[in-house]
Image: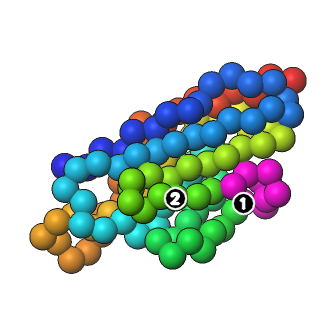
Amino acid sequence: QVQLVESGGGLVQAGGSLRLSCAASGSIFRIDDMGWYRQAPGKQRELVASITSGGDTTYADSVKGRFTISRDNAKNTVYLQMNSLKPEDTDVYYCNADIVLLGRQSGFDYWGQGTQVTVSS
């Protein structure tokens, strides 16, 4: 019923930039919080950044000042602008959204398929 499709990952040199996008589609009534998480093999998935429907943002300490999360509510899309990338930012990045479906009153968590970000030193 709902799909989150991510794009924008890839290989970049340290100090470079990438912009991730995640578009939600389907029987959507409303999207509340949206966010980006990342996960390395054998490690727990961790929050990178989140944004409320009103535009309030939260960042992991490790990315503050380098990453910027934003969203376009008309397009049901969330973005992650990543600047000054470091090799330790290498991970699979996952989009997350709290979505209320048409005809429902409460939301569910949905996840994208993940996009690989690799930063070479």
Q: Residue furthest left?
A: 103
The first of marks 1 and 2 along the sequence is 1
First to last magenta residue range: 60-68
Residue drawn at 62 percent across, 25 percent down: 10
Q: Position of residue 108 (x, y in %)?
A: 31, 64
Tag 2: amino acid = Arg
Query: Colour mode?
Result: rainbow
* Residue that mark 1 sits on: 60
Which of the two marks, 1 or 2, is nearer to us in this view? 2
| Residue type for callout 1 | Ala
Q: How many marks?
A: 2
- The percent coordinates of residue 104 (x first, y second) are 17, 72
The vertical placement of 80 against 98, above or below, is above
Q: Which mark is residue 85?
A: none
Q: Quadrant of residue 8?
A: top right
The residue indicated by pointer 2 is: 71
Query: Which residue sits at x=63%, y=69%?
Result: 57
Is residue 7 found left or right of 84 in the rendered image?
left
Q: Residue at x 51, y 76 (%)?
A: 54
Residue 39 shows in this picture: no
Packing grade of label 2 (10 A; few <14, some 14-19, many >=20) is many
Residue at (52% x, 58% y) in the render: 71
Q: Give coordinates of residue 106: x percent, y percent.
A: 26, 74
Q: Position of residue 69 (x, y in %)?
A: 62, 56
Q: Nearer the viewer, residue 116 or 81?
A: 81
